[in-house]
Image (tube, rainbow, N blue to C red):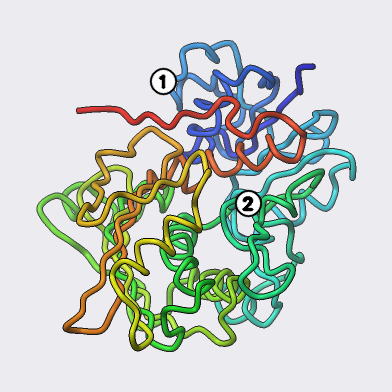
Amino acid sequence: MTFSVAVAGASGYAGGELLRILAGHPDFEVRTVTAHQNAGHPLIAHQPHLRSLAHLTLQDTTAETLAGHDVVFLALPHGTSGEIAAQLPEDTVVVDCGADHRLEDPADWAAFYGGEYFGAWAYGVPELPSGDGAAGTAAKQRDRLVGARRIAAPGCNASAVSLALAPGIQSGIIDEQDIVAVLAVGPSGAGKSLKTMYLASEILGSANPYAVGGTHRHIPEIQQNLRKAGAASPTVSFTPVLVPMSRGILATSTARVKPGVTAEQVQAAWEAAYQGEPFVQVLPAGTVPRTADVLGSNTVLIGVALDEAAGRVVTVLAIDNLYKGTAGAAIQSVNIALGLAETAGLTVNGVAP
């Protein structure tokens, strides 16, 4: 069976990455693409790399245009997808690649985003703990995605930090009260918005911190994920830094280790957490990843070490923010929801050089 697909926000970076993956998916057919100010333009004018989809024209982003498809992906700015999603049929699989349906606590939404709260959907990181069952069990978010008709794709930074630290929380070997994460991120995660801080002349040759001091919107999402891994009230200091690479995230996350924990126990905890996962790989002890190793893939690479002098676990995680950080996670989740092979249409192989 072939499932019909519509992608809203198809002229942006996330929309383009969704379309690039969907174009090679054996079970999906992209029939409709939409935009706002770019409606009426040929898709190829805004996504010139998508040659196999050159026959498509961007239509207006309305519920009427999107209805009638088996799957709808909403790659829209935060605060705009909730209203459209509410108008789509209940039997349609709808995936929000924005933030409108990620947070379970309305107070978190009000504090970090503001505006109308649209409720939480099944969270689209299958490899993370789901919070179901007893502490320390292997229940994962994957279970909540089976048969889901409403899916919230993750924030790329949030999924990176959460995947990096969840094994330590779940195994009980790190302290949830002193978590520090510093991320080197490519500017494509911010979309195509024309802002001075994203201009090449501002980024090239420089590293630019932003959302410093606990203000980044992904913080409550990280905390929500770590609570599902077993943390009661996690404290996270999170600082992203824009660096001159178009895509990719290198997340260095640290936490105090519990007394008596050894480097061998640390390595074993992370390997056990992701054993058998098709897209999350823990590297051998003494090895750390580079963003170059995951670009263009749905792969997550994690290196983990014990800094004995500081008494801290150090994790280094690399993902492609547009692929596994957004579009790949969305499609992986839809595969699960529809009962398809979880890996269908997705690759573990990156692009080099």
- Report x, y in % for residue 276: 53, 43
Residue 110, placed above or below residue 13: below
Q: Secondary structure at mark 2?
A: loop
In the image, taking residue 150 as reference, residue 195 lies left or right, namely: left
Mark 1 closeness class: few <14, some 14–19, many ≥20 residues within 10 Å: few
Q: Nearer the viewer, mark 2 or mark 1?
A: 2
Q: Amino acid at mark 1?
A: Pro
How many numbered marks does the figure carry?
Answer: 2
The residue beneath circle 1 is 48
| The quarter of the displayed image where residue 48 is located | top left
Q: CA distance from mark 2 to mark 1?
A: 28 Å
Q: Residue at x 54, y 76 (%)?
A: 223
The residue tagged 2 is: 124
Q: Is residue 321 left or right of residue 108?
A: left
Residue 252 image-quadrant placement = bottom left
Residue located farthest toward the left when viewing the structure as drawn: 205
Where 11 sits versus 161, above or below?
Answer: above
Residue drawn at 71 percent across, 74 percent down: 134
Neighbor class of circle 2 (other Cα within 10 Å; few <14, some 14-19, many 20+) is many
**Residue 218 higher or lower than 303, as above or below:** below
Q: Looking at the image, which is closer to me, 146 or 261?
A: 261
Is 121 in front, or is 134?
Answer: 134
The amino acid on which the numbered mark 2 sits, given as a three-letter code, is Gly
* Left or right: 67 as drawn, with respect to 55: right
Instruction: Point out residue 290 in the picture as x, y percentages from the top left corner.
Output: 23, 47
Q: Is residue 281 above or below residue 102?
A: above
Q: Quadrant of residue 59?
A: top right
